[in-house]
Image (spheres, rainbow, N blue to C red):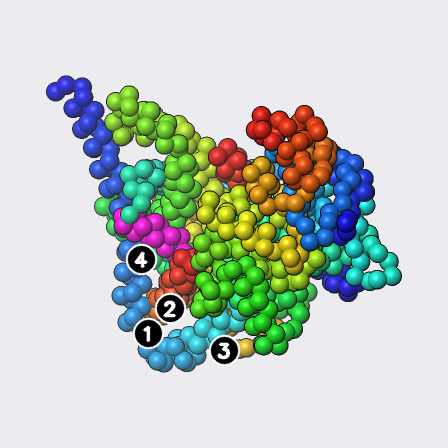
C-alpha cells in the first residue's frame, strides 16, 4: 500500500547560478525510512535542505518546483510548502545535522525543550517535565542523563549530544524527521546506537536520511533514492535496489567504484 | 676560535641582548606604577573621596565632583554605544558582504584610529555649539563615539565565532530568525561581547582629550547632564599644569584611583575571557 | 503566523537602520570637519602648510611649525621604540611563546597600553622633564626639560606595546616546517630568526609600525603636557614645540575668531585624513596576512 506523506514535483535548486539538483520527482512513504545516497557533491544534502526550506537561507540560493506535505487539515490532502510560512514548515519537518549541535548556552533539559522555549511557547512545569522525559526516553538517553538535566549539553559525548539533538527535534512532534549524515562525526559504537535508534523511531515519525555510507543505507532504510550529479538516478525498495540495481552508476556506487 | 663556536656565541649574545631590551622597555611602566602608588596613597583619605575641591590656599578638599562626573560620563556613553554597537556588529556578522556592511566596516576601522581629540571637536559642533554651552551629554557622546567601534568589532567577531549550525538548529525548530538571533546567537556570544565592552570602558574611563571642549569640567557638584561636568582625567590634567604643589598632589591621588579602577576592569576582563 | 514573519521584517529593518546610522555618523563626521574648515581652506589654501606664521591677533595662520613638530615627535618616537619593539617581538614571538614569562610579559604590555595618557603625561611632567633638564644642564644645553625629545620618549613608551603585539602575532604565524627546515640545515636559533622568521613576517612588522605611527601622530594629552607649546619651528630635538593635536588641545576653547577656529579644524581635518589613511593601510596589510593563513 502506497501512503505518501511528502511529494516532490520537478524540484530544482541552484546556488550562485550553479545548478545543484534538477527536476527531481519523489514520493516519501509515511512511517518508512528513506535513504538518500550518492557520491559527495551529488546534491543529496541540498535536496534534504529544500524539504524544510533551509536551502533558501543560503545567500544566492534558488529553488523551483513543488514540495507537497500531507495536510493536517482533512479537506485538502496536501499543502504546498513553497507558499507556506517556512516557520510552520520547519515545525512539521524536524532536522538533525551532520555534527551534533546542542545549544551551548542551554542545559540538557532546556535543549530538549528548545523548540518551545525559543519560540516563546509557554508550558506548565509538569507538561515540560513530561515532554523532556518522554523524548529523552525515545532516544534512549534518559537513564544516562536524568541526574544531570541541569548541566549544559556540551558536556556530553558526541554520540549522546547527537541523541540529544534528535530528542530536541522530536520534542516538537514533527511528522517528518530529516537526518543529514547524522553519524558522520561519530565513532562506530555511537553510530551503531544511532542506527538502532533510527529504526526504532520509524514507528513515530517518517524518516529521510542522507548518507554517503552504503552500508548504513542498507542497514536502516526501507527505500533508497540514488542521486548522481544532481539527477535522481534510481528510486525504489532498498532490498530491490541493493540486490538488483537497474542503473550502471548505481551499481558502481554500491560496489564502491565511485564515491 | 672556530666558526661554529663564534656562531653559537653570537646566538647567545643576541638572545641575552633582546631579553635585556625587553626588560628595559618595562622599566618606565614600573616607575609610573611606583610614582602613582607612592604619591597617590599619600593623599587618599575619606575627605579626598567625598568632598568638593576647595579654593587654593585652603587645605583639604576632594574630588567628589570628578568621581561623580566620570561615573555619569561613562554610564551615558555605555548606554549610547552598547545597543548600537551590538546591533551593528550583529548586522556585520550576518550580512558580511554587502555594500552597507563593507562601508560600515571601513568607517568603524577609521574610527578606531581617529585621534580622540578630533572626536571631541565633532561632539563640540554637534552638541555643544547648538546647545550654546558645554555639557556632560556632549562629553558622553564623544566617549560613546570612541567606544562604539570597539563594541562593533568585538560583537562581529564573537557572533562569527558561533558555529553556523547552531543558528540552523534553531531555525530548523521553526524558530523565527529574529528569535534565533536574540535567544541563541547573542547569548552564545555574550561573554565575548562583554569582554570587548569592558576593555572599551577601561579605555574611555581615562580619556581626556575629547572632554576638553565637551564636558569641560566644573568645580561644583553637578548631576545635570545638560550642564558642564567634571571628570577625573580632566582634573589630573588641570591640576598637573597648575602652579600649585597641593594640586599636583591631588593629580597623583586621582591617577591612583583611575589606575586601580582600570586594573580591576582588566582583571574582570581576564576572568570573563577565560570563560569563553 | 503572519505576525512572526512581520517581526522578522521589523527586526531586519532595525538591523539595517541602526547600521545605516553608524555609516551616517561616519560620513557626517567627515563632512563636519570639511564644512567647519572651509573658511580657512579658502583663505589659506595650500599655503597653510608652508607658512610659519601662527598669529591669532592678525588672523594669520600657517601650520608648518605644528606639522614639523608632529612629524618630528612621531618619527623620533618610532626610532626610539624600534629596538625595544623588535626585542619584544622576538622574545614573545619566538623565545617565550608560552609559559610563565610569556604570560607575565604579555600581561605587562597589555597593562601599559591601558594606562590613560594623562597619567603618563603626569609622570612625564614630574619625573621625565626634570630628568631631561638635569641631562641638559650637564651637557650645557638650554635647560627646557620639556620639548620634542621628552615628548618623543613618552610617545615611544606608549607605542612600544602596541606595535610589538602586532609584530609578535605576525612572527608566530611563521610555519613550523619552515623553521625546522632551517634548523635541519644547521642554522642557530638567531640565524633562523634573522633569515627565516623576520623576512617571513616582514609585512606584519610593517603593519605594526604603521599602526603605531598612527597612534603617535594623534596622541594628544601626554604630548600637550611635556612638549612646551611653542609656536616656532623647533631649532633642535630638545627645543619646545607643538604638534597638531597639542595645539588643538591648547587653543580650541580660546579660539575667538571664526577664522581662528576654522584654522584649528583645518588642522584636525589634516590629522584625521593622515591617521585614517595610515590606519586603513595597516589594517589592510593585517587582513591580507590573515587571508594568506
> What kind of element bears circle 2?
helix
- Give the magenta range: C100-116
Location of mark 3 (residue) = B220
Dots 1, 4 in contact, CB < 8 A: no
The foreground one among B246 and B3 is B3
Q: Which mark is residue B32?
A: 4
Q: CA distance from mark 1 to mark 2?
A: 9 Å
Q: CA distance from mark 1 to mark 4?
A: 18 Å
- Decide which of tag 3 and tag 1 comes sooner along the chain: 1
User: Taking C204 as reference, is B265 above or below it?
Assistant: below
Q: Residue at x 25, y 22 (%)?
A: C186
Tell me the quarter of the image containing the C terminus of chain B: bottom left
User: Taking A249 as reference, is C214 above or below it?
Assistant: below
- Decide which of tag 1 and tag 4 comes sooner along the chain: 4
Q: Residue at x 34, y 71 (%)?
A: B246
Location of mark 1 (residue) = B44
Closer to the observer: label 3 or label 1? 1
Amino acid at each position: 500500500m502506497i501512503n505518501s506523506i511528502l511529494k516532490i514535483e520537478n524540484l530544482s535548486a541552484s546556488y550562485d547560478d550553479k545548478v545543484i539538483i534538477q527536476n527531481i520527482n519523489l514520493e516519501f512513504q509515511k512511517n518508512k525510512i528513506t535513504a538518500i545516497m550518492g557520491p559527495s557533491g551529488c546534491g543529496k544534502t541540498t535536496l534534504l535542505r529544500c524539504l524544510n526550506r533551509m536551502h533558501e537561507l543560503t545567500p544566492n540560493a534558488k529553488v523551483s518546483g513543488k514540495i507537497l506535505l500531507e495536510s493536517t487539515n482533512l479537506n485538502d490532502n496536501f499543502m504546498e510548502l513553497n507558499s507556506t510560512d517556512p516557520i510552520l514548515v520547519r515545525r512539521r519537518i524536524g532536522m538533525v545535522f551532520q555534527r551534533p549541535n546542542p545549544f551551548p548556552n542551554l542545559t540538557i533539559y532546556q535543549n530538549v525543550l528548545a523548540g518551545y522555549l525559543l519560540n516563546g511557547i509557554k508550558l506548565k512545569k509538569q507538561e515540560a517535565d513530561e515532554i523532556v522525559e518522554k523524548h529523552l526516553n525515545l532516544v534512549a538517553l534518559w537513564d544516562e542523563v536524568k541526574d544531570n538535566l541541569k548541566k549544559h549539553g556540551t558536556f556530553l559525548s558526541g554520540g549522546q549530544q547527537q541523541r540529544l539533538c534528535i530528542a530536541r527535534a522530536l520534542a516538537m512532534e514533527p511528522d517528518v524527521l530529516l537526518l543529514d549524515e547524522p553519524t558522520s562525526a561519530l565513532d562506530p559504537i555511537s553510530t551503531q546506537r544511532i542506527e538502532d535508534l533510527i529504526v526504532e523511531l520509524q514507528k513515530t515519525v517518517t524518516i529521510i536520511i542522507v548518507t554517503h555510507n552504503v552500508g548504513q543505507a542498507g542497514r536502516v532504510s526501507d527505500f533508497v533514492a540514488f542521486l548522481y550529479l544532481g539527477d535522481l538516478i534510481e528510486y525504489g525498495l532498498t532490498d530491490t535496489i541493493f540486490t538488483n540495481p537497474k542503473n550502471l552508476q548505481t551499481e558502481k556506487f554500491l560496489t564502491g567504484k565511485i564515491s | 676560535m672556530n666558526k661554529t663556536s663564534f656562531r653559537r656565541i653570537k646566538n647567545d649574545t643576541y638572545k641575552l641582548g633582546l631579553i635585556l631590551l625587553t626588560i628595559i622597555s618595562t622599566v618606565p611602566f614600573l616607575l609610573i606604577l611606583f610614582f602613582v602608588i607612592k604619591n597617590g596613597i599619600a593623599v587618599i583619605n575619606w575627605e579626598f573621596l567625598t568632598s568638593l575641591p576647595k579654593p587654593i590656599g585652603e587645605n583639604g578638599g576632594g574630588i567628589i565632583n570628578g568621581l561623580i562626573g566620570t561615573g555619569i560620563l561613562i554610564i551615558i556613553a555605555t548606554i549610547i554605544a552598547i545597543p548600537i554597537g551590538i546591533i551593528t556588529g550583529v548586522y556585520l556578522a550576518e550580512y558580511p558582504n554587502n555594500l552597507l556592511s563593507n562601508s560600515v566596516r571601513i568607517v568603524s576601522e577609521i574610527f578606531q584610529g581617529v585621534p580622540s581629540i578630533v572626536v571631541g571637536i565633532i561632539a563640540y559642533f554637534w552638541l555643544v555649539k547648538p546647545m550654546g554651552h558645554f555639557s556632560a551629554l556632549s562629553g558622553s557622546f564623544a566617549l560613546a563615539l570612541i567606544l562604539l567601534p570597539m563594541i562593533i568589532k568585538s560583537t562581529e567577531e564573537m557572533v562569527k565565532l558561533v558555529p553556523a549550525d547552531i543558528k540552523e538548529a534553531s531555525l530548523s525548530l521553526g524558530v523565527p530568525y529574529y528569535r534565533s538571533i536574540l535567544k541563541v546567537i547573542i547569548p552564545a556570544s555574550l561573554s565575548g561581547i562583554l569582554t570587548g565592552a569592558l576593555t572599551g570602558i577601561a579605555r574611555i574611563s581615562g580619556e581626556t582629550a575629547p572632554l576638553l571642549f565637551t564636558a569641560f569640567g566644573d568645580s561644583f557638584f553637578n548631576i545635570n547632564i545638560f550642564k558642564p561636568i567634571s571628570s577625573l582625567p580632566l582634573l589630573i590634567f588641570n591640576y598637573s599644569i597648575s602652579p600649585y604643589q597641593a594640586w599636583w598632589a591631588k593629580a597623583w591621588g586621582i591617577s591612583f584611583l583611575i589606575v586601580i579602577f582600570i586594573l580591576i576592569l582588566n582583571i574582570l576582563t581576564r576572568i570573563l575571557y577565560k570563560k569563553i | 503566523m503572519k505576525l512572526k514573519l512581520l517581526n522578522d521584517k521589523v527586526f531586519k529593518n532595525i538591523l539595517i537602520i541602526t547600521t545605516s546610522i553608524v555609516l551616517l555618523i561616519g560620513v557626517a563626521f567627515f563632512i563636519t570637519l570639511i564644512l567647519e574648515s572651509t573658511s580657512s581652506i579658502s583663505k589659506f589654501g595650500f599655503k597653510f602648510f608652508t607658512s610659519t606664521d601662527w598669529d591669532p591677533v592678525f588672523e594669520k595662520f600657517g601650520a608648518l611649525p605644528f606639522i614639523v613638530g608632529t612629524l618630528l615627535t612621531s618619527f623620533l618616537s618610532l626610532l626610539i621604540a624600534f629596538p625595544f619593539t623588535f626585542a619584544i617581538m622576538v622574545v614573545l614571538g619566538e623565545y617565550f611563546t608560552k609559559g610563565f614569562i610569556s604570560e607575565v610579559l604579555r600581561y605587562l604590555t597589555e597593562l601599559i597600553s591601558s594606562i590613560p595618557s594623562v597619567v603618563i603625561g603626569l609622570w612625564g611632567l614630574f619625573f621625565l622633564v626634570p630628568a631631561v633638564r638635569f641631562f641638559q644642564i650637564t651637557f650645557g644645553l638650554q635647560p627646557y626639560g620639556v620639548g620634542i625629545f621628552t615628548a618623543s620618549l613618552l610617545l615611544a613608551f606608549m607605542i612600544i606595546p602596541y606595535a610589538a603585539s602586532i609584530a609578535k602575532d605576525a612572527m608566530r604565524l611563521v610555519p613550523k616546517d619552515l623553521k625546522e627546515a632551517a634548523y635541519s640545515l644547521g642554522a642557530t636559533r638567531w640565524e633562523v630568526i634573522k633569515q627565516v622568521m623576520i623576512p617571513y613576517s616582514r609585512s606584519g612588522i610593517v603593519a605594526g609600525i604603521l599602526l603605531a605611527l598612527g597612534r603617535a601622530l594623534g596622541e594628544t594629552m601626554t604630548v600637550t603636557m611635556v612638549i612646551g607649546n611653542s609656536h616656532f619651528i623647533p631649532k633642535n630635538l630638545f627645543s619646545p614645540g607643538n604638534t597638531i593635536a597639542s595645539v588643538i588641545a591648547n587653543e580650541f576653547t580660546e579660539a575667538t575668531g571664526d577664522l581662528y577656529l576654522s584654522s584649528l579644524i583645518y588642522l584636525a581635518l589634516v590629522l584625521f585624513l593622515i591617521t585614517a589613511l595610515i590606519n586603513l593601510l595597516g589594517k589592510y596589510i593585517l587582513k591580507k596576512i590573515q587571508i594568506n593563513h
